[in-house]
Amino acid sequence: MTGRNVSSGMTRTEKLLGGGLLAVYAVVLPWAADPVFDLIGRLSGAIVSNGIRDAAYYYILFALTLIAFRRYLGRNARAFFDHAGRALVSVGMGLAAFYGLNELVFRLLRMLGLGQANLNDQAILARMGSAPRSTVLTLVFLAPLVEEVLFRGYIFGNLKEVSRPAAYLVSCLFFAFLHVWPFAVSGRDLSYLLVVVQYLVPGAVMAWTFERSGSLWGSVLLHGVVNGISVWSVR
């Protein structure tokens, strides 16, 4: 398998499961999680912190991902180790591209007066203070696997079989929009959707790493490393 020929590698059943998991990730849990945790808090008489909520939220998604895609992840693991040198080089190049391009984009946004605060990053910082262990678990291990399966494996991989440019465009926009829309809705501020621009570079670099490494585990590793560096930098 070469990097340029990588596809989703998903069976028809896995593609159907991917659509269901994406719906759970994007629609069901964002609306249902808080009411459920509030109910648990009332019944138990305890306050469920945001850090614990995030960990539980992603643990559910992580478990569903492993159950639905264990064979897909196994195939990608074999592809990673069969070409481990190329995969690791791709991750290293992706890491350099991530920080270099991100810096250029943020400087450009500041020049244009669009350097809006990222509420997702602020929420993560707050949770690092209240529940550091569960937040680290979520950011470094749980979220990277779930998001890479959905955005790179399912969306990018399947669309690339039809159109490579469309695969990059749609997967990047989905990745960006789903990190931004809850804050735009909760704050009733549609202008916050402009923060989507801040996520386009990460989405593109993760997709490139998946494609170049020939394995989803390349982008999972890069995603985990980037999140780990971010966590380490604020501790």
Image (cartoon, grey):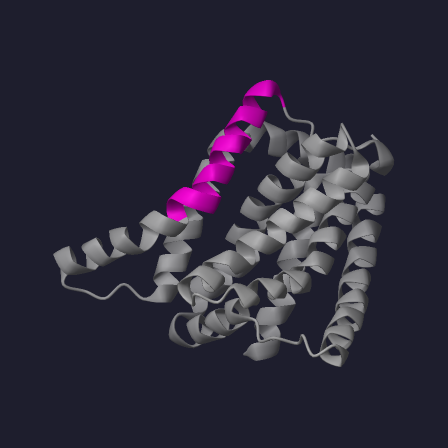
Tell me which residue sits at (77%, 61%) in the image: 95
Tell me which residue sits at (51%, 28%) in the image: 17
Whether the magenta-drawn stretch holds residue 117 is answered as no
Range of magenta residues: 11-29
Q: Tell whether 70 sits left or right of 219.
A: left
The one nearer the camera, 160 or 9, is: 160
Tell me which residue sits at (50%, 74%) in the image: 122
Quadrant location of the C terminus?
bottom right
Whether the magenta-drawn stretch holds residue 19 is answered as yes
Residue 130, image x, y percentages: 38, 74
Q: Quadrant of residue 94?
A: bottom right
Q: Tell me: residue 214, above or below residue 203.
A: above
* Residue 50, visible in the rendered structure: yes
Tell me which residue sits at (61%, 30%) in the image: 72
Q: Which residue in the rendered view is the most extreme toward the top?
A: 12
Quadrant location of the N terminus?
top right
Residue 76, image x, y percentages: 68, 34
Residue 13, image x, y percentages: 55, 20
